[in-house]
Image (spheres, rainbow, N blue to C red):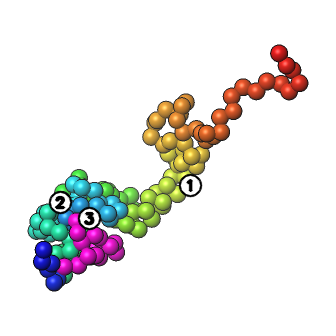
Amino acid sequence: MTENKDYKHIIRVVNTDLDGSKAISHALKKIKGVNFMFANMVCHLAKLDHNKKAGDLNDNEVESLNTVLKDPSSTGAPVWMLNRRHDPFTGDDKHLVMGDLKFTQDNDIRRMKKIKAYRGTRHMFGLPARGQRTKSNFRRNKGNVQGVKRKAGKKK
């Protein structure tokens, strides 16, 4: 089997190392904030074959992937595919990946706690925020089950 001399075992896209032996659409899923459908859309917008190995990409193709991932709405991505629509501060539609996603999520939760919104108080107490049942799930002492203890000194 002959190997391409330009083959890279690891490529760097949006500050993430991707495996060069995987197809682009599957390798992109390693980036936090990118799922299978979004990865296919990015490949389509960058005009790349999604079955092509990530290690076979040249520098121009990697750069086009970076530009599409950083601002997909400017390259023609539909608004419903983005993960941050109608940002409360700017009103823009954007797609966040990697550290920006985690930072924004933490800030949103911190803001909800500060204004004492319902979801914020649920986050404060470590309870589910989306209406799940709590009778049997979300128990704090899961594994430290004690049961009924009888009084010391009494024997049957």
Q: Is tag 1's residue or tag 2's residue first in the polypeptide sequence?
A: 2
Q: Which residues are magenta?
A: 7-22
Secondary element at tag 2: helix
Question: In the rendered view of the protein, which quadrant contains the N terminus?
Answer: bottom left
Q: Is residue 85 above or below residue 152?
A: below
Q: What residue is at 65 percent from the left and 39 percent from the top?
A: 144
User: Mark 1 is on which residue type?
Assistant: Lys
Give me the disc on residue 41.
2
Residue at 54% from the left image edge and 39% from the top image edge? 138
Is the residue under label 3 in contact with that under label 1 (CB below 8 Å)? no
Disc 1 designates what residue? Answer: 114
Q: CA distance from mark 1 to mark 2?
A: 37 Å
Select label 1 or label 2 by which is in front: 2
Q: Kindly indicate the quadrant of the structure image that contains residue 7.
A: bottom left
Residues 116 and 125: in front is: 125
> In the image, residue 85 lies at what x, y percent?
30, 56
Closer to the camera in the image, 67 or 36:
36
* Residue denoted by label 3: 28
Please check the rendered image and state whether residue 113 is part of the magenta-colored stretch, yes or no. no
Neighbor class of circle 3 (other Cα within 10 Å; few <14, some 14-19, many 20+) is many
Where is residue 140 drawn, in percent x and y?
61, 41
Q: Residue at x 39, y 63 (%)?
A: 101
- From the viewer's perspective, is 69 left or right of 146? left
Q: Residues within 10 Å of mark 2 (few under 14, many from 20)?
A: some
91 with respect to 55 (left or right) = right
What element does badge 1 sit on?
helix
**Can residue 73 be seen in this snapshot?**
no
Q: Can you give x and y, in whole percent of width and height, for residue 21 in the image?
A: 23, 69
